[in-house]
Image (cartoon, rainbow, N blue to C red):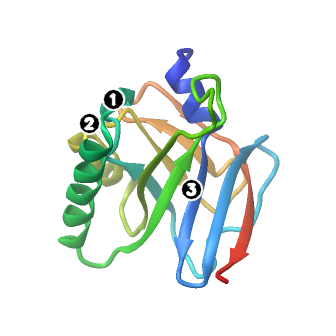
Amino acid sequence: MDDPTWEEFRRTTVRLTLPDGTLDIAPSPVGERGTFLPGATGPIHILTAQNPMGIAATDDANAAANERLAAELATIEGLGVWPATGYGGGPLDGDGTWSEQGFAIEGLSRAAAIALAIRHEQRAIFAWHDEPGGFRLVACDGSADEPRGWTAAFTPAS
């Protein structure tokens, strides 16, 4: 897939907010495999409800969208959920300030994660598995599923 928004997705770094600090997950070549989320036993799906279909929304609209997603996640039993922030660095992020709030979720199948993202008008999710090439960028319409490696850097809470 070759469009400017998809290229932004490819360059997105994700910061998970954990009880004891933050974990920054950055895409890298397929052969690289960083630390997986400590204590996680299954795939982690990372998604947002902000900026539907990659179109910039207001701060208020994005905050409301994130609250709706959080409320929906709260109704599903058995999930591990951590706040996540995707941030840029690609050509559309000229001033380096782009970010989107969302969640990293353990306990959903890929199909359920994609269905959730579609309900919140998203183009893609990240599917993170503890295996080589396991930080995948997945189009919600099925048109792309790109394996990538990752690096991970943990910063303890101060």
Residue picked out by circle 2: 121
Which residue in the structure is indicated by mark 1? 53
On the image, the x and y values in percent for residue 147 come to 64, 40
**Above-or-below relation of 4 to 17:** above
Determine which of the numbered discs, if any, sits on residue 79 in the image.
Answer: none
Find residue 7 and report its image quarter: top right
The type of residue carrying mark 1 is Met
Alpha carbon separation for disc pair 3 and 2: 21 Å
Q: Residue at image x 53%, y 15%?
A: 3
Q: Position of residue 72 (x, y in %)?
A: 20, 62
The answer to whether residue 78 shows anywhere in this view is yes
Q: Which residue is mark 3?
A: 128
Task: Determine contact: label 2, label 1, CB under 8 Å.
Answer: yes
Q: Earlier in the sequence, mark 3 or mark 1?
A: 1
Query: Extreme top residue here?
Result: 2
Q: Residue at x 55, y 34 (%)?
A: 9
